[in-house]
Image (cartoon, rainbow, N blue to C red):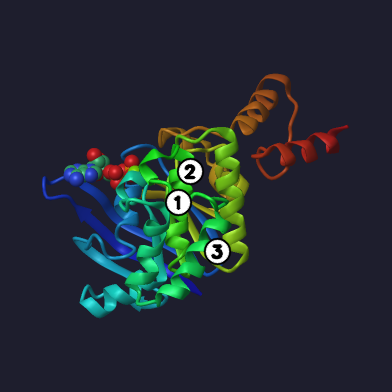
Amino acid sequence: MKVVEAKNISYKYPDGTVALDNINFSVSKGDIVSLLGPNGAGKSTLFLHFNGIFTPSEGEIFIDGKRLDYDKKSLVDARGKVGIVFQNPDDQLFAPTVEEDVAFGPLNLGKPIDETKDIVESSLKKVGMEGFEKRPPHHLSGGQKKRIAIAGIVAMNPKIMILDEPTSGLDPKGVSQILQLLYDLNKEGITIIISTHDVDLVPLYSKRINVIKKGVIVKEGTPQDVFRDIDIIRSSNLRLPRIAHLAEILDKEDNVNLGEDGYPLTISQSRRDILKLL
Ligand SMILES: Nc1ncnc2c1ncn2[C@@H]1O[C@H](COP(=O)(O)OP(=O)(O)O)[C@@H](O)[C@H]1O
Ligand SMILES: [Mg+2]
Protein backbone atom coordinates (compact mmCIF):
# COMPACT_ATOMS: atom_id res chain seq x y z
CA MET A 1 0.00 0.00 0.00
CA LYS A 2 1.24 3.48 -0.90
CA VAL A 3 1.39 5.74 2.15
CA VAL A 4 2.87 8.77 0.40
CA GLU A 5 2.28 9.69 -3.20
CA ALA A 6 3.00 12.72 -5.36
CA LYS A 7 1.18 12.68 -8.68
CA ASN A 8 2.38 15.00 -11.44
CA ILE A 9 3.63 17.62 -8.98
CA SER A 10 5.11 20.84 -10.30
CA TYR A 11 6.17 23.74 -8.13
CA LYS A 12 7.21 27.24 -9.05
CA TYR A 13 8.63 29.66 -6.43
CA PRO A 14 7.19 33.19 -6.44
CA ASP A 15 10.33 34.48 -8.24
CA GLY A 16 9.55 32.15 -11.15
CA THR A 17 12.09 29.38 -10.35
CA VAL A 18 10.60 26.05 -11.41
CA ALA A 19 11.85 23.77 -8.62
CA LEU A 20 9.76 20.67 -9.42
CA ASP A 21 8.68 19.59 -12.86
CA ASN A 22 5.99 16.91 -13.11
CA ILE A 23 7.22 14.72 -10.25
CA ASN A 24 5.75 11.27 -9.65
CA PHE A 25 6.97 9.75 -6.41
CA SER A 26 5.49 7.12 -4.16
CA VAL A 27 6.47 5.19 -1.06
CA SER A 28 5.03 1.89 0.18
CA LYS A 29 4.15 1.30 3.80
CA GLY A 30 7.09 0.17 5.94
CA ASP A 31 9.81 0.97 3.37
CA ILE A 32 12.92 3.10 3.74
CA VAL A 33 13.14 5.15 0.56
CA SER A 34 15.78 7.68 -0.49
CA LEU A 35 15.48 10.79 -2.57
CA LEU A 36 18.99 11.12 -3.98
CA GLY A 37 20.11 14.28 -5.71
CA PRO A 38 22.73 17.02 -5.72
CA ASN A 39 22.28 20.43 -4.12
CA GLY A 40 19.49 22.45 -5.67
CA ALA A 41 17.79 19.41 -7.26
CA GLY A 42 14.49 20.01 -5.44
CA LYS A 43 14.66 17.59 -2.51
CA SER A 44 13.64 20.04 0.22
CA THR A 45 10.97 21.59 -2.01
CA LEU A 46 9.39 18.17 -2.65
CA PHE A 47 9.48 17.21 1.03
CA LEU A 48 7.69 20.40 2.07
CA HIS A 49 4.75 19.22 -0.05
CA PHE A 50 4.24 16.10 2.04
CA ASN A 51 2.65 17.80 5.00
CA GLY A 52 1.12 20.66 3.09
CA ILE A 53 3.64 23.41 3.93
CA PHE A 54 3.86 23.97 0.17
CA THR A 55 0.86 23.71 -2.14
CA PRO A 56 1.83 22.40 -5.56
CA SER A 57 1.41 24.67 -8.58
CA GLU A 58 0.11 21.55 -10.35
CA GLY A 59 -0.60 17.97 -9.33
CA GLU A 60 -1.84 16.18 -6.24
CA ILE A 61 -0.44 14.75 -3.00
CA PHE A 62 -1.90 11.66 -1.32
CA ILE A 63 -1.14 10.72 2.29
CA ASP A 64 -2.24 7.27 3.41
CA GLY A 65 -4.46 7.06 0.34
CA LYS A 66 -6.23 10.38 1.04
CA ARG A 67 -5.85 13.39 -1.22
CA LEU A 68 -4.44 16.45 0.53
CA ASP A 69 -7.07 19.16 0.08
CA TYR A 70 -5.41 22.05 1.97
CA ASP A 71 -8.44 22.74 4.16
CA LYS A 72 -7.76 22.77 7.90
CA LYS A 73 -9.03 19.24 8.56
CA SER A 74 -7.04 17.68 5.74
CA LEU A 75 -3.84 19.48 6.84
CA VAL A 76 -4.27 18.48 10.50
CA ASP A 77 -4.85 14.90 9.39
CA ALA A 78 -1.74 14.88 7.16
CA ARG A 79 0.44 16.51 9.84
CA GLY A 80 -0.66 13.88 12.34
CA LYS A 81 0.59 11.17 10.01
CA VAL A 82 3.70 12.74 8.50
CA GLY A 83 6.56 14.17 10.56
CA ILE A 84 9.25 16.14 8.79
CA VAL A 85 12.73 16.63 10.22
CA PHE A 86 14.12 19.73 8.50
CA GLN A 87 17.56 19.89 6.95
CA ASN A 88 18.70 22.53 9.42
CA PRO A 89 17.80 21.76 13.06
CA ASP A 90 17.92 25.51 13.82
CA ASP A 91 14.77 25.85 11.68
CA GLN A 92 13.04 23.32 13.93
CA LEU A 93 14.29 23.84 17.48
CA PHE A 94 12.98 26.97 19.15
CA ALA A 95 12.18 26.34 22.83
CA PRO A 96 14.53 27.43 25.66
CA THR A 97 15.10 23.83 26.79
CA VAL A 98 15.27 20.43 25.14
CA GLU A 99 12.31 19.06 27.11
CA GLU A 100 10.06 21.99 26.19
CA ASP A 101 11.01 21.55 22.56
CA VAL A 102 10.17 17.84 22.51
CA ALA A 103 6.98 18.46 24.55
CA PHE A 104 5.66 21.04 22.10
CA GLY A 105 4.29 18.55 19.55
CA PRO A 106 2.42 16.24 21.95
CA LEU A 107 0.99 19.21 23.93
CA ASN A 108 -0.15 20.73 20.68
CA LEU A 109 -1.88 17.46 19.80
CA GLY A 110 -3.80 17.83 23.08
CA LYS A 111 -1.93 15.27 25.20
CA PRO A 112 -2.18 15.84 28.98
CA ILE A 113 0.92 17.02 30.87
CA ASP A 114 1.59 13.69 32.61
CA GLU A 115 1.43 11.70 29.40
CA THR A 116 3.57 14.32 27.65
CA LYS A 117 6.26 13.93 30.32
CA ASP A 118 6.40 10.19 29.63
CA ILE A 119 6.49 10.81 25.88
CA VAL A 120 9.36 13.30 26.23
CA GLU A 121 11.29 10.83 28.37
CA SER A 122 10.80 7.91 25.99
CA SER A 123 11.52 10.02 22.87
CA LEU A 124 14.79 11.34 24.30
CA LYS A 125 15.74 7.81 25.32
CA LYS A 126 15.05 6.56 21.81
CA VAL A 127 17.47 9.07 20.28
CA GLY A 128 20.06 8.54 23.05
CA MET A 129 19.67 12.04 24.49
CA GLU A 130 18.34 11.33 27.96
CA GLY A 131 19.96 13.64 30.51
CA PHE A 132 19.78 16.65 28.18
CA GLU A 133 16.25 17.70 29.26
CA LYS A 134 17.21 21.04 30.81
CA ARG A 135 19.83 22.03 28.24
CA PRO A 136 19.20 24.86 25.76
CA PRO A 137 19.07 23.29 22.25
CA HIS A 138 21.17 26.08 20.73
CA HIS A 139 24.15 25.07 22.92
CA LEU A 140 24.24 21.52 21.56
CA SER A 141 26.46 20.12 18.80
CA GLY A 142 25.11 19.63 15.27
CA GLY A 143 24.59 15.89 15.76
CA GLN A 144 22.90 16.39 19.13
CA LYS A 145 20.59 19.04 17.66
CA LYS A 146 19.62 16.63 14.89
CA ARG A 147 18.78 13.95 17.44
CA ILE A 148 16.65 16.40 19.44
CA ALA A 149 14.85 17.47 16.25
CA ILE A 150 14.17 13.77 15.54
CA ALA A 151 12.96 13.26 19.13
CA GLY A 152 10.50 16.14 18.64
CA ILE A 153 9.02 14.35 15.64
CA VAL A 154 9.11 10.87 17.28
CA ALA A 155 7.13 12.41 20.18
CA MET A 156 4.23 12.99 17.79
CA ASN A 157 4.14 9.31 16.89
CA PRO A 158 3.96 9.74 13.10
CA LYS A 159 3.32 6.83 10.72
CA ILE A 160 5.70 8.37 8.21
CA MET A 161 8.95 10.19 8.95
CA ILE A 162 10.59 12.38 6.36
CA LEU A 163 14.17 13.43 7.04
CA ASP A 164 15.85 16.08 4.93
CA GLU A 165 19.59 15.28 4.75
CA PRO A 166 19.68 13.80 8.26
CA THR A 167 23.37 12.84 8.10
CA SER A 168 24.83 15.94 6.45
CA GLY A 169 27.52 17.66 8.47
CA LEU A 170 27.85 14.86 11.02
CA ASP A 171 31.03 13.05 11.99
CA PRO A 172 31.25 9.28 11.22
CA LYS A 173 29.99 8.24 14.66
CA GLY A 174 27.12 10.77 14.41
CA VAL A 175 26.19 9.32 11.02
CA SER A 176 26.11 5.73 12.36
CA GLN A 177 24.02 6.80 15.35
CA ILE A 178 21.44 8.46 13.11
CA LEU A 179 21.34 5.46 10.74
CA GLN A 180 20.93 3.03 13.64
CA LEU A 181 18.11 5.17 14.99
CA LEU A 182 16.37 5.21 11.62
CA TYR A 183 16.66 1.40 11.33
CA ASP A 184 15.14 1.05 14.80
CA LEU A 185 12.26 3.41 14.02
CA ASN A 186 11.63 1.54 10.76
CA LYS A 187 11.58 -1.78 12.64
CA GLU A 188 8.84 -0.33 14.81
CA GLY A 189 6.80 0.12 11.63
CA ILE A 190 7.48 3.74 10.71
CA THR A 191 7.85 4.39 6.97
CA ILE A 192 10.98 6.45 6.37
CA ILE A 193 11.86 8.82 3.54
CA ILE A 194 15.34 10.34 3.49
CA SER A 195 16.89 12.90 1.20
CA THR A 196 20.63 12.84 0.68
CA HIS A 197 23.42 13.29 -1.81
CA ASP A 198 25.57 10.74 -0.01
CA VAL A 199 25.94 7.92 -2.53
CA ASP A 200 28.10 5.82 -0.19
CA LEU A 201 25.43 5.72 2.50
CA VAL A 202 22.33 5.35 0.38
CA PRO A 203 22.82 1.64 -0.57
CA LEU A 204 23.25 0.76 3.12
CA TYR A 205 19.68 1.51 4.08
CA SER A 206 17.49 2.17 1.05
CA LYS A 207 14.93 -0.31 -0.15
CA ARG A 208 14.30 1.95 -3.13
CA ILE A 209 15.99 5.08 -4.46
CA ASN A 210 14.56 7.98 -6.48
CA VAL A 211 17.16 10.09 -8.25
CA ILE A 212 16.16 13.74 -8.67
CA LYS A 213 17.90 16.14 -11.02
CA LYS A 214 16.78 19.72 -11.65
CA GLY A 215 13.27 19.07 -10.37
CA VAL A 216 12.77 15.87 -12.37
CA ILE A 217 12.87 12.26 -11.11
CA VAL A 218 15.28 10.70 -13.61
CA LYS A 219 15.48 7.19 -12.16
CA GLU A 220 13.66 5.01 -9.63
CA GLY A 221 14.41 1.51 -8.43
CA THR A 222 16.39 -0.67 -6.06
CA PRO A 223 19.95 0.47 -5.28
CA GLN A 224 21.26 -2.11 -7.81
CA ASP A 225 18.88 -0.81 -10.53
CA VAL A 226 19.80 2.79 -9.90
CA PHE A 227 23.59 2.49 -9.71
CA ARG A 228 23.71 0.19 -12.74
CA ASP A 229 22.68 3.26 -14.72
CA ILE A 230 26.09 4.90 -14.43
CA ASP A 231 25.34 7.55 -17.09
CA ILE A 232 22.27 8.80 -15.24
CA ILE A 233 24.19 8.87 -11.96
CA ARG A 234 27.13 10.84 -13.37
CA SER A 235 25.01 13.21 -15.44
CA SER A 236 23.00 13.98 -12.29
CA ASN A 237 26.16 15.38 -10.65
CA LEU A 238 26.41 12.29 -8.47
CA ARG A 239 28.95 9.47 -8.55
CA LEU A 240 29.11 5.74 -7.89
CA PRO A 241 29.65 4.61 -4.30
CA ARG A 242 33.45 4.38 -3.77
CA ILE A 243 33.34 0.61 -3.57
CA ALA A 244 31.44 0.40 -6.90
CA HIS A 245 33.90 2.83 -8.46
CA LEU A 246 36.78 0.57 -7.37
CA ALA A 247 34.93 -2.41 -8.89
CA GLU A 248 34.46 -0.44 -12.14
CA ILE A 249 38.21 0.32 -12.31
CA LEU A 250 39.11 -3.33 -11.59
CA ASP A 251 36.67 -4.40 -14.29
CA LYS A 252 37.84 -1.97 -16.98
CA GLU A 253 41.57 -1.82 -16.27
CA ASP A 254 42.39 -5.20 -14.80
CA ASN A 255 39.64 -7.38 -16.23
CA VAL A 256 38.52 -8.46 -12.77
CA ASN A 257 34.74 -8.63 -12.83
CA LEU A 258 33.08 -8.40 -9.43
CA GLY A 259 29.36 -9.00 -9.10
CA GLU A 260 26.98 -10.61 -11.58
CA ASP A 261 24.24 -8.16 -10.73
CA GLY A 262 26.11 -4.89 -11.33
CA TYR A 263 29.03 -3.60 -9.30
CA PRO A 264 28.90 -4.18 -5.53
CA LEU A 265 27.63 -1.08 -3.70
CA THR A 266 28.65 -1.84 -0.14
CA ILE A 267 31.68 -3.34 1.56
CA SER A 268 29.74 -6.48 2.51
CA GLN A 269 28.57 -6.99 -1.10
CA SER A 270 32.11 -6.55 -2.38
CA ARG A 271 33.42 -9.04 0.17
CA ARG A 272 30.82 -11.56 -1.01
CA ASP A 273 31.79 -10.95 -4.66
CA ILE A 274 35.53 -11.20 -3.93
CA LEU A 275 35.09 -14.47 -2.01
CA LYS A 276 33.27 -15.91 -5.04
CA LEU A 277 36.33 -15.20 -7.21
CA LEU A 278 38.79 -16.86 -4.82
N1 LIG B 1 12.68 30.44 -1.60
C1 LIG B 1 13.10 30.18 -2.84
N2 LIG B 1 12.88 31.05 -3.86
C2 LIG B 1 13.30 30.78 -5.11
N3 LIG B 1 13.96 29.65 -5.46
C3 LIG B 1 14.21 28.75 -4.49
C4 LIG B 1 13.81 28.96 -3.13
N4 LIG B 1 14.20 27.89 -2.40
C5 LIG B 1 14.81 27.05 -3.26
N5 LIG B 1 14.82 27.58 -4.52
C6 LIG B 1 15.36 26.94 -5.75
O1 LIG B 1 14.63 25.77 -6.00
C7 LIG B 1 15.49 24.73 -6.48
C8 LIG B 1 15.37 23.51 -5.56
O2 LIG B 1 15.88 23.86 -4.28
P1 LIG B 1 15.84 22.84 -3.05
O3 LIG B 1 14.52 22.19 -3.00
O4 LIG B 1 16.27 23.61 -1.85
O5 LIG B 1 16.96 21.79 -3.48
P2 LIG B 1 17.72 20.68 -2.60
O6 LIG B 1 16.98 20.53 -1.31
O7 LIG B 1 17.73 19.45 -3.46
O8 LIG B 1 19.12 21.19 -2.40
C9 LIG B 1 16.89 25.33 -6.56
O9 LIG B 1 17.07 25.79 -7.88
C10 LIG B 1 16.82 26.50 -5.59
O10 LIG B 1 17.71 27.51 -5.97
MG1 LIG C 1 17.63 20.74 0.60
Pick out the residue farthest to the right. Answer: 278
* 123 is higher (above) or lower (below) than 143: below
Element type at mark 2: helix
- Which percent across, then down, holds residue 27? 47, 64
Q: Is mark 2 within 8 Å of ligand 2?
A: no
Tell me the quadrant of ligand 2.
Answer: top left
Q: What residue do we see at 45% from left, 34% from top?
A: 169
Location of residue 10 by image quarter: bottom left
Which residue is depicted at the point 65% across and 41% down?
262
Tell me if mark 3 has few (under 14), some (14-19) or many (20+) residues whose alpha carbon lies within 10 angstroms of its own.
Answer: some
Q: Residues within 10 Å of mark 1 (few under 14, many from 20)?
A: many
Q: Earlier in the sequence, mark 2 or mark 3?
A: 3
Q: Which mark is residue 86?
A: none
Amino acid type shown at disc 2: Gln
Disc 3 residue type?
Ser
Q: Residue furthest left?
A: 15
> From mark 3 to mark 1, how far is it between C-alphas?
12 Å
Q: Which residue is mark 2?
A: 144
Q: Which amino acid lies under the numbered mark 1 shown in the image of this protein?
A: Ile
Rendered residue at 43%/45% (across/down): 145
Which one is earlier in the sequence, the residue at label 3 or at label 1?
3
- Which residue in the protein does label 1 denote? 148
| Disc 1 residue lies near ligand 2 with CB under 8 A | no
Which residue lies under the disc numbered 3? Answer: 122
* 262 or 174, nearer to the observer: 174
